[in-house]
Amino acid sequence: MKVAFTGRNLVVTPAMQEFATERLEKLDHWLDGPSEAQVILAKEKYRHIAEVVVKGKNVVLSGTQETEDMYSSIGKALEKIEHQARRHREKHTVAKRRRARKSGNNGSESDEVVEELVLTTLPEGEHILRDEGYHRKPMTLEEAALALEEQEHPFLVFREAASQRFGVLYRRADGNLGLILPSD
């Protein structure tokens, strides 16, 4: 990654350059292809401002942070950039999966399954994903049992053909199937 530094009202030390460059190198696995970065460091009285702009193959990421310590400003600006890079990568991955599913799907709308999307990211870094969810076509209990056997998930959410209610069919620890229906 090419990194250019600019200092406004301060001298950019080699330690600052090394600190920023190490953090920017970690972004390479989130971005597609070669990238370049512009790091602008400024000092105005007691304010230390770090502005970082990263240009990747298909994306431009930017982050600005102002604190009373230059290293803290650089670190927080780069955290913003990392967050943007992760979101860009997740969007790219989801779109790629969606295209793969559409090309593999036979076009039958009744068997179409809800797409997988990232709903939110938890503070621990884990993601809440909307998964395949439920089949839109109403099914009998026997059809749902067959569909559950065909998939690798331990449960299946489906719409019951007779009552049009949603139900959950799941594999029990004893090898049998369990059924959860909403109470009336």
Image (cartoon, rainbow, N blue to C red):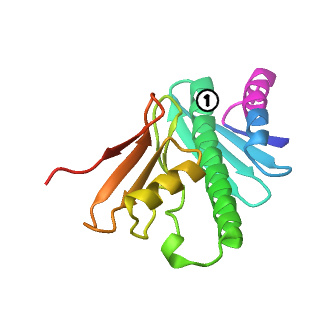
Residue in the picture at 13% in, 54% down = 184
Q: Is residue 177 visible?
A: yes
* Closer to us: 60 or 142: 142
Q: Is residue 21 magenta?
A: yes
Judged left or right of residue 67, residue 78 is right
The N terminus lies in which quarter of the figure? top right
Q: How many marks?
A: 1
Main SS of the magenta part reads helix
Question: Please, what is the three-letter code of the amino acid marked with disc 1?
Answer: Gly
Q: Point out the residue furthest to the left here.
A: 184
From which residue to which does the magenta span run? 9-23
Q: Which is nearer the eye, 39 or 123?
A: 123
Q: Residues within 10 Å of mark 1 (few under 14, many from 20)?
A: some
Residue placed most toward the observer, 152 or 32: 152
Residue 42: x %, y % from top left: 63, 37
Specify whether residue 119 is painted magenta: no
Instruction: Specify the quadrant of the image occupied by residue 167.
Output: bottom left
Please indicate, yes or no, whether residue 117 appears anywhere in the rendered image. no
Query: Where is residue 113 drawn, in percent x and y?
Result: 51, 64
Element type at marker 1?
Answer: helix
Above or below, 122 relative to 131:
above
Spot occupied by residue 86 in the image (x, y as percentages of width and height): 63, 44
Q: Residue at x 40, y 65 (%)?
A: 139
**Which residue is painted at 42% across and 42% down in the image?**
170
Note whether 167 is above or below 42 in the view shown: below
Q: Which residue carries the number 1 mark?
A: 75
Q: Position of residue 32 (x, y in %)?
A: 79, 51
Left or right position of 127 against 75 = left
